Amino acid sequence: MTTHLPPSERFAFVYRGCSMVCTAEFVGRAAYRPVVIYRFGLPELGATTVPVIDTSCTTISAAILRGQQTAMLWINERTRHLNWWF
């Protein structure tokens, strides 16, 4: 059984114009799974859950950090063709 955490345990951020939310799901025995949600920012792509490969986190903060790293990599893959030099 998984349990969602309260809003205080979420981290929302914007990276390269994309709005993301990272949180963690308790999956038992002091184990947490990162949950990453893409909200908006890329053309022709609606809100979706980003797949997270590694789910072996022992704390909420570690799961959220892993989620943030995953979100940034996911965005980088989708914006590689754009020019981000200002």
Image (tube, rainbow, N blue to C red):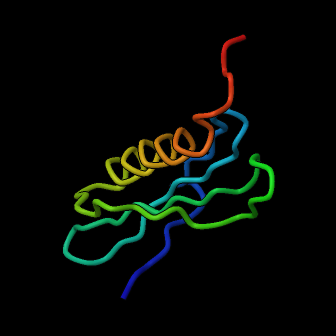
Is residue 5 or residue 77 the one in the foreground? 77
- Whole-percent x, y for residue 59 in the image: 28, 55
Is residue 44 or residue 24 the one in the foreground? 44
Is residue 1 or residue 78 the one in the foreground? 78
Give the residue at x 74% y 48%.
42
Which residue lies most toward the left here? 29
Which residue lies most toward the front here? 81
Which residue lies most toward the bottom here? 1
Up the image or down, 43 lies above or below 26; here it is above
Give the residue at x 64% y 56%.
38
Give the residue at x 28% y 59%.
54
Residue 51 occupies which quadrant of the picture?
bottom left
- Whole-percent x, y for residue 75 in the image: 57, 43
For the N terminus, the quadrant is bottom left
How many numbered badges does the structure rendering display? 0
Give the residue at x 24% y 67%.
31
Which residue lies most toward the top here? 86
- Whole-percent x, y for residue 34 in the image: 40, 60
With 66 as the anchor, is 31 left or right in this view?
A: left
For the C terminus, the quadrant is top right
- Whole-percent x, y for residue 36 in the image: 52, 58
